[in-house]
Image (cartoon, rainbow, N blue to C red):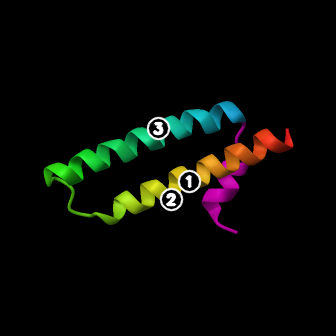
Amino acid sequence: MNKVLQELRKKDIDQLNAELVATRQEQFNLRIKHKTGQLNETNQLTLARKKNCKNKNINERIKITG
Protein backbone atom coordinates (compact mmCIF):
# COMPACT_ATOMS: atom_id res chain seq x y z
CA MET A 1 0.00 0.00 0.00
CA ASN A 2 1.08 3.56 -0.65
CA LYS A 3 2.97 5.22 2.23
CA VAL A 4 1.02 8.43 1.76
CA LEU A 5 -2.27 6.61 2.24
CA GLN A 6 -0.98 4.83 5.33
CA GLU A 7 0.07 8.15 6.85
CA LEU A 8 -3.28 9.74 6.05
CA ARG A 9 -5.22 6.86 7.61
CA LYS A 10 -3.35 7.31 10.90
CA LYS A 11 -4.54 10.91 11.25
CA ASP A 12 -7.76 12.08 12.87
CA ILE A 13 -10.44 14.32 11.33
CA ASP A 14 -8.95 17.61 12.57
CA GLN A 15 -5.51 16.81 11.20
CA LEU A 16 -7.01 15.73 7.87
CA ASN A 17 -9.01 18.95 7.61
CA ALA A 18 -5.91 21.03 8.37
CA GLU A 19 -3.93 19.15 5.73
CA LEU A 20 -6.80 19.54 3.26
CA VAL A 21 -6.69 23.32 3.69
CA ALA A 22 -2.93 23.29 3.23
CA THR A 23 -3.06 21.16 0.07
CA ARG A 24 -5.82 23.32 -1.43
CA GLN A 25 -3.72 26.42 -0.76
CA GLU A 26 -0.71 24.71 -2.34
CA GLN A 27 -2.80 23.76 -5.38
CA PHE A 28 -4.05 27.33 -5.72
CA ASN A 29 -0.52 28.74 -5.52
CA LEU A 30 0.69 26.29 -8.15
CA ARG A 31 -2.14 27.28 -10.49
CA ILE A 32 -1.29 30.97 -10.10
CA LYS A 33 2.40 30.27 -10.75
CA HIS A 34 1.50 28.22 -13.82
CA LYS A 35 -0.69 30.97 -15.27
CA THR A 36 2.00 33.61 -14.73
CA GLY A 37 4.69 31.40 -16.28
CA GLN A 38 6.70 30.94 -13.08
CA LEU A 39 6.09 27.19 -12.74
CA ASN A 40 8.62 25.08 -14.61
CA GLU A 41 7.53 21.65 -13.40
CA THR A 42 3.88 21.43 -14.40
CA ASN A 43 3.59 17.89 -13.06
CA GLN A 44 3.38 19.46 -9.60
CA LEU A 45 -0.15 20.54 -10.48
CA THR A 46 -1.17 16.93 -11.04
CA LEU A 47 0.58 15.73 -7.90
CA ALA A 48 -1.11 18.39 -5.77
CA ARG A 49 -4.51 17.52 -7.24
CA LYS A 50 -4.01 13.81 -6.55
CA LYS A 51 -2.83 14.49 -3.00
CA ASN A 52 -5.90 16.63 -2.44
CA CYS A 53 -8.21 13.88 -3.75
CA LYS A 54 -6.57 11.21 -1.58
CA ASN A 55 -7.01 13.42 1.45
CA LYS A 56 -10.69 14.05 0.66
CA ASN A 57 -11.31 10.35 0.08
CA ILE A 58 -9.77 9.29 3.41
CA ASN A 59 -11.61 12.11 5.18
CA GLU A 60 -14.98 10.98 3.80
CA ARG A 61 -14.28 7.33 4.66
CA ILE A 62 -13.51 8.27 8.26
CA LYS A 63 -16.69 10.38 8.49
CA ILE A 64 -18.82 7.54 7.13
CA THR A 65 -17.35 4.81 9.32
CA GLY A 66 -17.33 7.01 12.39
Give the magenta range: 1-12
x, y (%) of residue 55? 60, 48
As helix, strand or loop, the secondary structure at mark 1 comes to helix
Q: Amino acid at mark 2?
A: Lys
Q: How much space separates mark 1 and mark 2, taking CA atoms? A: 5 Å
Three-letter amino acid code at the position of disc 1: Cys
The answer to whether 41 is drawn above or below residue 52 in the figure is below
Name the amino acid, label 3.
Ala
Return the mark for residue 2.
none
- Mark 1 or mark 3: name the one nearer the start of the chain: 3
> Picture quarter containing residue 18?
top right
- Do the residues under discs 1 and 2 have CB atoms within 8 angstroms? yes
Q: The C terminus appears in which quarter of the rendering? A: top right
**Which quadrant would residue 42 be assigned to in this image?**
bottom left
Q: How far across and how far down the image is residue 39, in percent? A: 21, 56
Residue at (61, 58) in percent of width and height: 4
- Asked if residue 57 is positioned above or below residue 44 in the image, the reply reads above
Identity of the residue furthest to the right in this view: 65
Q: Residues within 10 Å of mark 3 (few under 14, many from 20)?
A: few
Q: Residue at x 72, y 50 (%)?
A: 9
- Whether residue 19 sits left or right of residue 64 in the image: it is left
The outermost residue toward the left is 37
Q: Quadrant of the N terminus?
A: bottom right
10 Å crowding of disc 1: few (<14), some (14-19), many (20+):
some
Q: Which residue is mark 3?
A: 22
Q: Which mark is residue 50?
A: 2
